[in-house]
Image (cartoon, grey):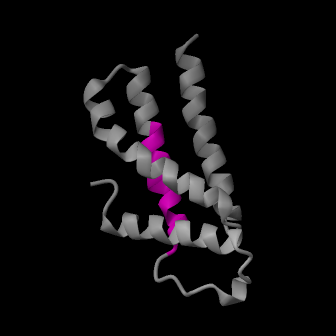
């Protein structure tokens, strides 16, 4: 399973961090989250990449496998945009997006 119980907790932590930023809570007052929700960036980018690849290849089985995870992926990135603790992960995500969208653009040539 790509999105496990641990992943769901990480998603909740990321949403909580976004709310902390939204309400201008000083970072020194943030709770100590037991998991690093930024680590969820890797499986979420994997989900998006594999789903895009399945669309390009018209692979219905893979589309059905990855499409249920797209909602959680979008919720994660929505919350991640609001959190200000993502410098390392922004670079990683940018490279992953470039690879994914490069495949999409090259396949349409």
- Residues in magenta? 36-49
| Relative image position of residue 71 (x, y in whole percent) | 42, 46
Q: Is residue 37 magenta?
A: yes
Query: What is the residue that sits farthest to the top in this orientation?
Result: 109
Taking depth in this image into account, of 95 and 51 the one nearest to the observer is: 51
Please give the name of the residue rendered at 38% of the width and 64% of the height, measured from the top-left corner: 8
In the rendered image, the vertical position of residue 69 relative to residue 8, given as above or below: above
Which of the 4 image quarters holds residue 9? Answer: bottom left
From the viewer's perspective, tell me whether residue 57 is left or right of residue 104.
left
- Is 61 located above or below residue 21 in the figure? above
The x and y percentages for residue 62 are 30, 33
Q: Position of residue 89 (x, y in %)?
A: 63, 59
- Image label count: 0
* The stretch drawn in magenta includes residue 16: no
Q: Quadrant of residue 90?
A: bottom right
Task: State the quadrant of the N terminus.
Answer: bottom left
Query: x and y percent of residue 63 in the render?
Result: 33, 31
Which residue is found at the position 25% from the left and 29% from the top? Answer: 61
The residue that appears at 35% across and 69% down in the rendered structure is: 6
68 shown above or below 92: above
Q: Quadrant of the C terminus?
A: top right
Viewer-proximal residue among 70 and 60: 70
- Determine whether, in the image, residue 87 is placed left or right of residue 101: right
- Residue lying at the far front of the rendered structure: 23
Q: Residue at x 71, y 82 (%)?
A: 27
Please identify the dominant SS of the magenta region.
Answer: helix
47 lies above or below 56: below
């Amino acid at each position: 399973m790509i999105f496990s119980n641990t992943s769901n907790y990480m998603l909740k932590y990321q949403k909580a961090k976004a709310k902390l930023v939204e309400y201008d809570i000083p970072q020194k007052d943030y709770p100590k989250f037991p998991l690093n929700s930024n680590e969820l960036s890797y499986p979420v980018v994997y989900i998006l990449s594999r789903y895009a690849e399945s669309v390009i290849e018209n692979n219905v089985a893979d589309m059905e496998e990855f499409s249920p995870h797209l909602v959680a992926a979008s919720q994660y990135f929505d919350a991640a945009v609001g959190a200000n603790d993502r410098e390392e992960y922004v670079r990683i995500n940018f490279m992953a997006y470039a690879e994914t969208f490069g495949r999409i653009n090259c396949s349409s040539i």
